[in-house]
Image (cartoon, rainbow, N blue to C red):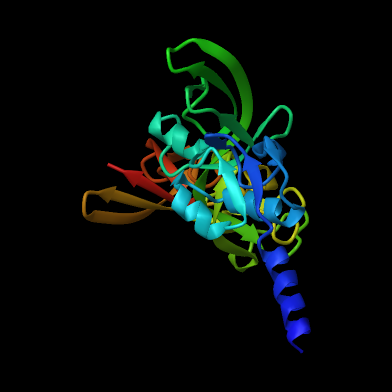
Amino acid sequence: MRLIFSFLLIFSSSVFSNDCTLSTHAKVLILSNDGDFSNLIKKSNCNDQSVSNFVNFTRNARGHIKPTLLAKLFPEITFSPTSIEFVSLQEALENKSLLPNEASLMSATKLNRSSLIGLENDQRLELECRSCPTTGFHNIKISIRDNLGQYLSTEWVKAEVGVPVKALVSNSTQTPTFKAIDPSLLITKTIISSNPENLVRAKTPVQFFKFSKTINSGEVLQKDHISSLQLVRPGTQARVLIKDGTITINGFAEPLSYGIYDQTIKLKNSKTSKIFWGKVIDNNSVVVEL
């Protein structure tokens, strides 16, 4: 029994004292939490599991990770350098005011598909983005310099920038039709979009539009999915709301052209033949702001 106990003690010690060394960068700029992190490790004799654990940790690491914390998290690894700084590209762009308000990086990769850039202690980086700060796709130039400001190298990053938008999402597949859209077919969701100008906003009165293009279930409603319905037409009297401050007067007039929602059209007072302009707000309804 004593012999077996001694053997287990020796065996377990050899397993859990599997000390190894891992060399990485002193500073790591994380472009995206996903993607290729293979160039994070410069040199290592650690087993695959230890390396994998460290790489997974770094995907969400931020700030200076000190030796004491590294020792607690990875007691089997001796790191070089002993402390590591992690910075996200989003944070770096925000510090340079190169992102719109509340914007997020939806994706960012180098041309070689790597999701990070490594720097040493005596190096720093500079960001340049001519098309920022706007949404959409951008080519970001990252220059690496030494501590004296001498140029060392350039990295190019392709990034997609989006902002939160309250949009409409279809809860079923819809095909082109001449009928007005039933608002119950759409639900409101906040999404991150890099092209918000192409989306139909949540407050849009979709009942004044029709589907002009197939939209699949779960797909975000874009402007090219719909087209406007004719709400007023010549020959059919339209109700006119005349607003002057807090006073509203109701009347009727004859539209002189077809009109869609929010369009300003010309109308004629049937009694006086007076011509005036009004904005279409509903079926056979126009408002005139005085």
Where does the image place residue 159, in percent across and percent down from the top left? 61, 33
Up the image or down, 152 lies above or below 208; here it is above
279, 163: nearer the viewer: 163
Q: Residue at x 58, y 56 (%)?
A: 74
In the figure, is residue 279 to the left or right of 39?
A: left
The residue furthest left is: 246
Q: Position of residue 273 (x, y in %)?
A: 40, 38
Residue at 72 percent across and 65 percent down: it is 15
Q: Quadrant of residue 290?
A: top left
The residue lying furthest to the front in this view is 2
Residue 171 in sight:
no
Furthest residue in direction top, as rendered: 150
67 up-or-down from 96: above or below: below
The percent coordinates of residue 230 (x first, y second) are 61, 48
- In the image, residue 240 lies at what x, y percent? 40, 51
Which of the two residues, 113 or 15, is positioned nearer the viewer here?
15
Looking at the figure, which quarter contains the N terminus? Answer: bottom right
Q: Residue furthest bottom?
A: 1
Reply above or below: 151 against 58: above
Q: Nearer the viewer, residue 76 or 237?
A: 76
Residue 28 placement, left or right of 112: left
Q: Is residue 48 above or below residue 35?
A: below
The answer to which of 112 and 40 lies nearer the viewer is 40
Number of marks in the rendered image: 0
User: What residue appears at the point 56 percent right and 14 percent down from the top-left corner?
Assistant: 152
Question: Would you say residue 131 is visible in this rendering?
Answer: yes
